[in-house]
Image (spheres, rainbow, N blue to C red):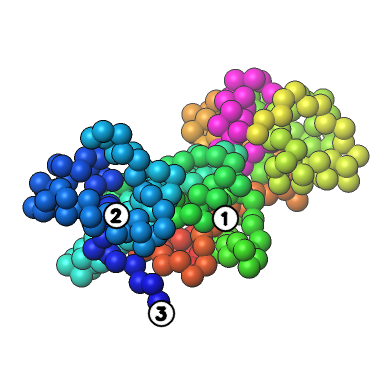
Amino acid sequence: MINRLNFHHLYYFWSVASEGHLTRTAERLHISQSALSAQIRQLEQQLGTPLFLREGRKLHLTDMGVKVMRYAEAIFSLGNELIAATQDGEGWRGSTLRIGSVSTLSRNFVEGFLQPVLASREVKLVLEAGDLDSLLARLSSYELDVVLSNRPVIADDKHPWRCRTLARQAVYLVGPPRPAGEDFDLVRDLPEQALVLPSAKSEIRVRFDLMCEQMGIQPSIHAEVDDMAMLRLLARDSGSLALLPAIVVKDELDRGLLQLYCSVPGVEETFYGITVKKRFETERLQRLFVQFGAR
């Protein structure tokens, strides 16, 4: 016999968790407090775990309650989106989009990815940065809709990831503006330059080190950085050459604060959008992928 979830009970739980107060929720829903408590107890019995910790009149979600709340938010958010989609054909009203991005990812790229929804006040954006493993854990527990990464992931039976390639960009050596007419030769000039590089765990760095080895270049490393925002600041302020995609320092290039010295052969950065296979993807999320030709 299938133990089906009672969505009526789930709705009452979601309402109380959102309100944070049993009495006010009961008044808003026009039911008695005892009836509301009974509905939530039935949900707890069905799930086999307490969802609230009761301290006097205050309610606090348990760890499992937090997880159930995430599922409830996704379920009822999709319900609201369904209603909006049937009314105006857009499916954007009252939506929440939760984006995770690895800390080594360009913020300019993240902003570009979100461009189709930035102008819409009907979409609430929740942006979270972190390391890839922690973001994937949150993705698998329905706490994020998508993770943006510059590292691919491989799916298996335990982790059914769907990893889309969004874009590939050349990587450059970037530094202070050079005197007019002064060229830059990679093999000749690179060993004489102080460098600001991504950390050794970066795909860009791995490819750069391989290129240097193949060309017999001994780089002079001034700093290694595992955060793209900090790499951007050091590229702008240190006076050293920095290794990064041009999009990271787009504003500084436009203002003439930095200059592209040369593209680095064989080195590029790939951007990925990671979701979970078999999970329903809302129209708002699909539109973000379509702009990159990824479906």
- Report the residue marked by disc 3: 1
Quarter of the picture containing the N terminus is: bottom left
Q: Position of residue 240 (x, y in %)?
A: 69, 23
Q: Secondary structure at mark 1?
A: strand
The residue lying toward the viewer, choosing from 78 and 172, is: 78
| Residue 53 vertical placement versus 191 (above, below) | below
The residue lying toward the viewer, choosing from 283 and 166, is: 283
Left or right: 174 as drawn, with respect to 253: right
Which of pointers 2 and 1 lies earlier in the amino acid sequence? 2
- Report the residue marked by disc 2: 41
Residue type pointed to by label 3: Met
Residue shown at 8%/52% (left/top)? 30
- Report the residue marked by disc 1: 272
Residue type pointed to by label 1: Tyr
> For the residues marked 3 and 1, what is the alpha-carbon distance in whole angstroms?
41 Å
Q: Which residues are magenta?
A: 227-248
